[in-house]
Amino acid sequence: MKFLTQSWDSGNAAIPLIEDTIGHHFEKMTTQFSEREALVSRHQNVRLTYKERKRAVIRGGENIYPREIEEFLYSHPAISDVQVIAVPDKKYGEELCAWIILKANQSATADDIRAFCKDKIAHHKIPRYVKFVEVFPMTITGKVQKFVMRDLMRAELKLEVDKTA
């Protein structure tokens, strides 16, 4: 993500007040303080680290934070664990996909999950794709491999990656 914003005295001028862009400073902070809290949205009870903030999904020009959607979905009584990823979409650039592990002896459908979200979160934050799984792909150290999930969904949905982005 690159921001072209620079600081100017008044309007556009030949010499910016500072040479660095907001995007440059954001990248620097993300690298230096990746585990520190970067954003708190009190009214939505969202707390993100710089690293999580950097992973925003952009759907139709709107930033969507997977962790925000995950935290909401954890409130569903049948969901044990959830991971939200972005998959390519021709119309919106990216679409949301939720991988869900259900609690023992619980059941739900993709339509049930979307109905649960309706009128509780913004329409553009409701996952278009919902996949029920037993486990998530993990590293040997126990971290979820979202890039593997994205690749599997691209193949399953026959989605192509936009090479121009």
Image (cartoon, rainbow, N blue to C red):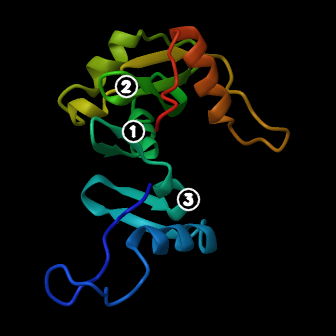
Q: Of 59 and 34, which appears nearest the observer?
A: 59
Location of residue 4 in the rendering, given as x and y in whole percent from the top left corner: 34, 65
Residue corresponding to mark 1: 69
Give SS at disc 3: helix
Gap in Å between the C-alphas at discs 2 and 1?
9 Å
Q: Earlier in the sequence, mark 2 or mark 1?
A: 1
Drawn side of residue 57 relative to residue 105, left or right: left
Question: Callout 1, which amino acid?
Answer: Ile
Q: Earlier in the sequence, mark 3 or mark 1?
A: 3
Marking on residue 51: 3
Drawn side of residue 12 relative to residue 58, left or right: left
Location of residue 29 in the rendering, given as x and y in whole percent from the top left corner: 53, 73
Residue at the right extreme? 140
Gap in Å between the C-alphas at discs 3 and 1?
16 Å
Marking on residue 127: 2
Question: Callout 2: 10 Å neighbours few (<14), some, many (20+)?
Answer: many
Disc 2 + disc 1, Cβ < 8 Å: yes
Question: Callout 2, which amino acid?
Answer: Pro
Question: Callout 3, which amino acid?
Answer: Lys
Question: Callout 1: 10 Å neighbours few (<14), some, many (20+)?
Answer: many
Marking on residue 110: none
Location of residue 28 in the rendering, given as x and y in whole percent from the top left corner: 56, 73
Q: Of 106 and 141, which appears nearest the observer?
A: 141
Query: Comparing marks 3 and 1, which lies closer to the viewer?
Result: 3
Question: Callout 3: 10 Å neighbours few (<14), some, many (20+)?
Answer: some
Q: Of 42 and 144, which appears nearest the observer?
A: 144
Residue at left 72%, top 27%?
137
